[in-house]
Amino acid sequence: MTNEFFESYKASVAHLETTRQAAKMRVEDVLESEPILVHEIHSRLKKPESLVRKFRTKRYEDPWHDITDIIGVRVILYYNDHVDLAVAALKKKLGWSRRHTIDKTENIGSKEFGYRSFHIVAELPKNLSQETQVPAGMRYFEIQVRSVLAHTWAQIEHEIVYKSGIKSPDIVRRFSAISGTLEILEREFVELRESLWKLVSRHKEEYSAKAEGAETLDSARLIAAMSVHASRRPSGWGGNQEIDSWLCFEEAKRHLDALGFAGVTTWNSLRSVFGSQEYKDSVVQYALEVGAETQNEISHRTMVQIAALTVEPRILTEFADLFTDEKVLKVMQRPKLSPADQMQET
Amino acid sequence: MAKKENSKIRVRFAVDDDEQANKICALLEALGYEAIRDVTPMPPKSRLRWAVHRLAVRAHLTEREQDILGQILAGRTNSEIADDSGASKATIKWHMHNIFAKTGVTTREALLRQALQLVGSTSHHRDDESADGTFVEPLEKKSVAEFGDKDYD
């Protein structure tokens, strides 16, 4: 039985590798559309040596079916509260096995600490191509989800406790103590993340109260100013493609650099660009280009890009990376009518 | 070797040089055949390069999109691509959005399937370990490595 298994393992290694890649992509596809900050997605094919260990301790009727982690994907997230979001999304969007899936936190009592790690046994991507076939009977792969801190804890614990074979209660207890501390740190990280949004709210109140701003913009101020200016987009950088809230700041920062290059550093100066005829013409052109009914459907991102390009066309080459929307390029590179031509037209 | 499928006749051919393969594809397609280059003898990296090229031609991808597609099919995540190229994660996400729109799919998994369909391998090589047109180096060091965790190694 065991030999037969290893024979088929060896014969299917290439297919297993391709399937592993597809499984990793399947996980990434789900997480991609969630507002979750992913640190790393790792995947691996179980080594024959660790399978040998499994066979030594357990009997399997059908190893390809019963060993559910031959292909494993590990998701490491920045924030602890994103772990629950990720698990919920994965369970909702992927087929998974209720029988095999364990939630390690369920076993943690109120007076105990332990690392939070979720294991989901999900359905394997199959029939990737005519040629890619995994052994019959193989149905699942395993997904582990944990935070960066929990991951760090588990890695070190594995080295010091599990691998060393030590049974000392004192050392085990000290590991539990660390994991208790990590719980506090996890909460603080989440709060710090949320505090960025409190900053945005404060600036929003400020800008809506006085309708002007001479202070130098930072990303929180830019997000706030834009959502006061075009208020229909609650996340600040929404539009024809929703940008996750955690990406807002990074996005805003890059656009801020482009604006800075164009000499636009305050809300007052950005507003005067928004008021210019050239900017307005470009926005109308863009709306026509994408078939937007009203300018409310244009994202903050696009507005800022058009504004920056209106003032300083060189941004196109200096910050080429920002311009992923070909329609913005098309509109901003259109031949401009000279004032004489405009007269003729009217 | 030709076999009929979806009313278009699939013609499989093997040639070493990408440029030659390109010409053969163009010719066969102009004649109304579906051209599949047999990539069995090629190393994974060359298979990937070929699949990306084919997808790019079909979907009219820009150079940047082509570059990102190649990295995605090689198994890299958005963040990894962003970190390496100095672009933001949001930018890579936008590029991915455009790639999806142009190729007519909505997931990476589907992109991989498309890419695997575009390259072929001959069935008589089935016993060969690398016969499925995979883009991954077989037994890639990192993917099978001991990962320092009792539930994962």
Image (cartoon, coloured by chain):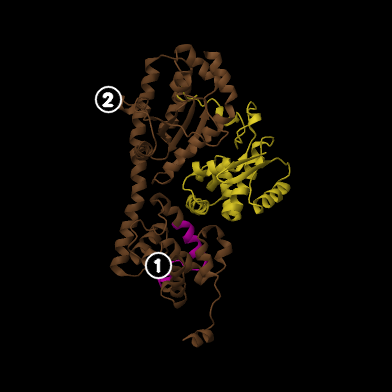
The subunit letter for the residue under badge 1 reads A
Q: Is residue B87 depicted above or below A287 in this figure?
A: above
Along the polypeptide, which appears first: circle 1 or circle 2?
A: 2
Q: Residue at x 55, y 39 (%)?
A: B75
Q: Quickly name the residue at label 2.
A: A109
Which quadrant would residue A105 be assigned to in this image?
top left
Q: Secondary structure at mark 1?
A: helix
Q: Residue furthest left?
A: A110
Q: Closer to the camera, A324 or B44? A: B44
Percent from the top left, x then y, of residue A27?
45, 38
Q: Which mark is residue A267?
A: 1
Q: Residue at x 45, y 22 (%)?
A: A65
Q: Amino acid at mark 2?
A: Gly
Q: Secondary structure at mark 2?
A: loop
Q: Residue at x 63, y 51 (%)?
A: B32
Residue interval drawn in magenta: A252-271
Distance, label 1 to label 2, CA atoms, is 52 Å
Q: Is residue B65 depicted above or below B142 in this figure?
A: below
